[in-house]
Image (tube, rainbow, N blue to C red):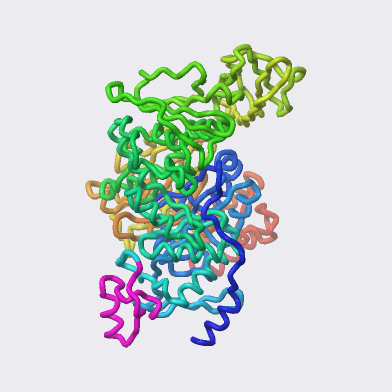
Amino acid sequence: MKKFFSIVCVTLLPLMMAAQGWPSNYGGVMLQGFYWDSYTDSRWTNLESQADELAEFFNLVWVPQSAYCSGYTSMGYDPLYWFSNYNSSFGNKNELLSMISTFNSKGIGTIADVVINHRKSSSDWVTFPNEMYKGVTYRLQSTDICKNDDGGATLEWATQNGKSLSANNDTGEDWSGLRDLDHNSENVQTCVKAYLDMLLNDLGYAGFRYDMTKGYSASFTGMYNAYAIPTYSVGEYWDGNQTAVKNWIDGTKVNGVVQSAAFDFPFRYAVRDAANGSSWTSLSGSGKGLNLESNYRRYSVTFIENHDTQYRDASNQQDPIRSNVEAANAYMIAMPGTPCVFLKHWMEYKEPIKQMIYARQLAGIHNQSTSFTQASSASSNYYVQRTVGTRGMLMVAMGSTAYSIPSTYVVVASGTNYRLALSKTTETAWASVPSGTRVDPFNVTLTAVSSTSSAQLVYTLDGSKPSANNGTVVASGTAIPINRSCTLNVGLLINGSVSGVITRNYTVINEDYEGYEITVFLKDPTVAPYNWPQVTYYCWDSYDAQQCGNWPGQVVTDTKVVKGVKFYYKTFTITGAEYYLNFVFNQGGSTASSHQTVDVTNVRNTVFYEVTTTTNKYQVRDVTDVYLPYLDNDVLVGDVNGDNNVSIADVTALIDYLLGGSVSINDDAADVNYDTFITIADVTALIDKLLTSND
């Protein structure tokens, strides 16, 4: 052990810089790129494919813990590996590196979910894997486990089995299930520092989200960040008490400098209560968020929902926002702090959230902007907040429309129980439709947000810069048609000068979109170990229309053997560029809920799935890469009965094909010269095979 420490200490010299926890005057918005069981939506390849769209609105994307845990249906909170195995529920290491690299090239920083309060052992209660990083072997020992782990149960087991734990008790809250680490241990500190170094400098992460920081002293987060120097660090100190969260932030200080931001749980609970009860005046008063306190706004990462608070299913309802989700997001995005948008909300309210972020960007709101209560009325049930940005002011009016927006503001976005208005001093153009893809042509209304009442607008649709001599001049409030894909640039035209130019990129898919068929395969769950009595598909599309009937759906009986494995399958049609399907696979009948999978969403292509067990619902693993290459060439073209043997019927069918003309095939068992056509030589070879066949 002494030799081990001497190697590590030489390798990991502290970096001579001071971390600041979170940038000052930071205007970015973060996306939580996952929700509970988001194995499809949060795949590294899927997130990477959205990089262009995400980059227009988000500066940071927080992703799940990316190393292998206990299986391929883990959300990352039972960490097993830190250094050596990056084949996770969301993709492999190459896909992870590709996603982070693409995000970086688009100006998006990737935030790693860092789970160091506890760790999963590899065999018995106290054994952890050996891992190599930069020529050094890292391994946690039984003596790195807190003495009072699991309320003393771990110590009892260790004593009975001749093992030793740390002499130190936990410095935070105990968490049963996995081993709580003793962060006073030099070995733990060494391993964590190396791990963080790897995340930043090898994998390319921009910063950290520390999980369950109530489980160990805030001083350790400070120590680790002072070493690693991430640009961004936010801790999950899950507490609605504002003083408690502030104390945790202060507890991360090193040499008087804060080392980490915190998720603003006090803000979250205030907005939850207001939204769920439609009691908007309850947002007024003190203690409603760190983002409203001058000394802590910089370190406030606001949110209204996450993977722990979201509604999961009827048996796991958690603590969600149950109503006014869109309005709650509008309030958060209009306020100081760094907003973190939940992936589920982004998917369900994408267009309005885009407009909210545009308004925040145009006003120049950042994490240390000042904000004031503009108006509040219990009798009329409205609450109005005004935030001062670097370019203008953004007003968010919550609740009823009884409050009259001042004439010095222009309402730019609105929805149920909210209105967003930019001050005219912002001096910008505005478009009623955000960038994105639409199936049909549409109109977009152009608005001048300007103190000059005579301000006009000039726009182009070819991506060129609008000017007094280039583009079409219209009055504020004009709706223009968009009937093709284009780049809209529009600016204010005042006394011959153009300013406040905004850009929107529109993709329009024509109505004559050519649909295509996809097939959804499910590996046979009617055999051991699952033993479902039958297979039922429940399916709904992007318009929430049911495609397999009412719950529990349609019994599927069609099967196909691919690569020697039996699959049930059903074919569907994709009818539009933004059209997708969602599935729950189950056994059907009155007990369908006892044998059902989690939701499988956003399916647009032929896919292969298999179910895996869990304590609540069956998880679903995407195995398309394994089986799709064998879909068309698993069975001989002439094997009409699908038994993979050559019979008289097969030869007859093959001759029929031949007489009808050349037929493209993929199986070399019949296509002996590999020219992908059936010839006399192929038939001869097939007959020769027949003569030696047992069939």
204 or 397: nearer the viewer: 397
User: Who is closer to the viewer here, 79 or 421?
Assistant: 421
Residue 166 falls inside the magenta stretch: yes
Q: Can you see residue 639?
A: no
Relative placement, left or right, of 548 versus 430 is left
- Estimate the x, y position of residue 379 in percent, counting from the top left: 27, 22
Residue at 42% across, 74% down: 184
Q: Residue at x 47, y 69 (%)?
A: 81
Task: Decide if residue 503 is on the left or right side of residue 471.
Answer: left
Q: Which segment is the magenta one?
A: 142-171
Q: Is residue 371 magenta?
A: no
- Residue 528 appears in the figure: yes
**Position of residue 558 measured from the top left corner of the image (x, y, whole percent):** 40, 49
Is residue 486 placed above or below 54 in the rendered structure? above
With respect to residue 474, does 583 lie above or below?
A: below
Which is nearer the eye, 670 or 359? 359
Hey, which residue is sitting farthest front in the picture?
256
